[in-house]
Image: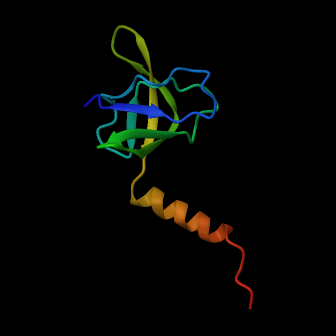
């Protein structure tokens, strides 16, 4: 639906303020396309959208792919939607990272 989104970058070398969700070759989540520049090393970067007055992480950048539209190739940046499966994986990794309780 071309909703505006933004990559949260550590360094502001690149302009990423005019990104949008894009129509995708994927028919359903968990992958979404966006117009952000998906350079090497940006995998794992949060993709945020404004929900009312609050910025909300909606996906993480995972890479890009080439798409052929019948006339030319188009680079499509991809994000993985933060759904229950991703949230559970983050929670499990956090639990493993906590030091064992002292007995």
Q: Toward which corner of the image does residue 31 lie, by quadrant?
A: top left
Which residue, as the protein is rendered here, is positioned at the far front? Answer: 53
Q: Name the residue located 43 percent from the left edge and 59 percent from the top edge.
A: 85
Picture quarter with the C terminus: bottom right
Q: Is residue 29 above or below residue 39?
A: below
Q: Toward which corner of the image does residue 6 lie, by quadrant?
A: top left
Applied colour scheme: rainbow
Q: Position of residue 99 (x, y in %)?
A: 72, 74
Q: Position of residue 12 (x, y in %)?
A: 60, 26
Q: How many marks?
A: 0
Which residue, as the protein is rendered here, is positioned at the far right? Answer: 102
Left or right of residue 30, residue 60 in this image = right
Q: Toward which corner of the image does residue 3 lie, by quadrant?
A: top left
Left or right of residue 10, residue 49 in this image = left
Q: Name the residue located 54 percent from the left edge and 60 percent from the top edge.
A: 90
Q: Name the residue located 74 percent from the left edge and 86 percent from the top edge.
A: 102
């Amino acid at each position: 639906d071309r909703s505006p989104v933004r990559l949260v970058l550590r360094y502001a070398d690149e302009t990423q303020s005019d990104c949008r969700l894009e129509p995708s070759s994927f028919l359903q989540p968990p992958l979404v396309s966006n117009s952000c520049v998906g350079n090497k090393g940006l995998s794992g970067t949060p993709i945020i959208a404004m929900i009312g007055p609050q910025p909300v992480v909606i996906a993480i950048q995972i890479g890009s792919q080439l798409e052929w539209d019948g006339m030319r190739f188009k680079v499509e940046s991809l994000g993985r939607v933060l759904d229950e499966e991703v949230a559970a994986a983050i929670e499990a990794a956090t639990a493993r990272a906590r030091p064992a309780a002292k007995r």
